[in-house]
């Protein structure tokens, strides 16, 4: 009889512990994953965008900072000289001249986290009142210096 009583008490104790853990964990589990992860970090995470991914604040010298500067600067021959690789300037102007003249400068934009590949860095962004999205593809030419090689603009 005492063995059965001990097993039943252990079941009740285990069940109570499970319920107590659920009461503590369930409010946190109801939060989005990014918020759950931010509890373990010293800095808060910015939100997630369905089209461009994790939103970021640009840091000086980063490809995100170059993208922010390029988006906020009026399109001109100086813009091309400053941001576009000399190797592709002619074809770049022929391909993107009208789009960039209409696009730049932007006052409203959000930047996504840079995606680093072997030779390039892609920085997704949202822009304008309609919050369209696009990507600037950069090549790092030296530590903290980038040159633009391609643009994608989506409707």
Image (cartoon, helix red, strand yellow):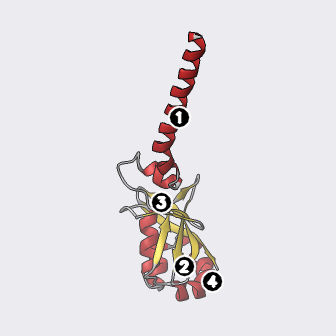
Q: CA distance from mark 1 to mark 3?
A: 56 Å
Residue 108, x across and y down, in percent: 45, 80
| Number of marks drawn | 4
Check disc 4 and report the residue beneath it.
Answer: 94
Query: What residue is rendered at 41% in x and 55% in y?
Result: 143
Tell me if residue 43 comes above or below residue 96 in the rendering.
above
Q: Report which residue position mark 3 lands on.
A: 141
Residue 93: quadrant of the picture:
bottom right
Q: Tell me which label, 3 or 4, sits earlier in the chain.
A: 4
The secondary structure type at the circle numbered 1 is helix
The Cα–Cα distance between marks 4 and 2, rounded to whole angstroms, is 25 Å
Give percent across and percent down for residue 12. Answer: 54, 27
Q: CA distance from mark 3 to mark 4?
A: 23 Å
Residues packed near mark 3 inside 10 Å, few (<14), some (14 to 19) or many (20 plus) = few
Which label lies toward us, 2 or 1? 1
Task: Give whichever of discs 2 and 3 has the lower sequence position.
Answer: 2
Frontmost residue, 120 versus 9? 9
- In the rendering, at what x and y percent does residue 64 appear? 45, 65
User: Please, is residue 92 above or below residue 113 in the view?
Assistant: below
Q: CA distance from mark 4 to mark 1?
A: 66 Å
Of the image marks 4 and 2, the number of the one nearer the N terminus: 4
Residue carrying label 2: 131
**Gap in Å between the C-alphas at discs 2 and 1?**
45 Å
- Secondary structure under tag 3 reads strand
User: Of circles 2 and 3, which is in front?
Assistant: 2
Quarter of the image with the C terminus is bottom right
Q: Dot 1 corresponds to which residue?
A: 18
The kind of secondary structure element at disc 2 is loop
Q: Residue at x 51, y 84 (%)?
A: 129
In the picture shown, does residue 113 fall above or below 155?
Answer: above
């Amino acid at each position: 009889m005492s063995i059965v009583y001990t097993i039943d008490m252990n079941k009740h104790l285990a069940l109570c512990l499970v319920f107590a853990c659920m009461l503590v964990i369930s409010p946190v589990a109801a939060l989005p994953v990014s918020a759950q992860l931010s509890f373990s970090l010293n800095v808060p995470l910015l939100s997630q965008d369905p089209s461009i991914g994790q939103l970021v604040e640009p840091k000086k010298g980063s490809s995100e900072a170059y993208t922010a500067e390029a988006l906020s600067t009026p399109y001109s021959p100086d813009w091309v000289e400053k941001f576009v690789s000399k190797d592709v300037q002619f074809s770049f102007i022929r391909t993107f001249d009208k789009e960039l003249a209409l696009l730049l400068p932007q006052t409203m934009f959000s930047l996504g986290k840079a995606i680093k590949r072997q030779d390039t860095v892609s920085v997704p962004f949202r822009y304008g009142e309609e919050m369209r999205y696009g990507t600037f593809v950069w090549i790092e030419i030296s530590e903290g210096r980038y040159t633009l090689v391609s643009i994608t603009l989506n409707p």
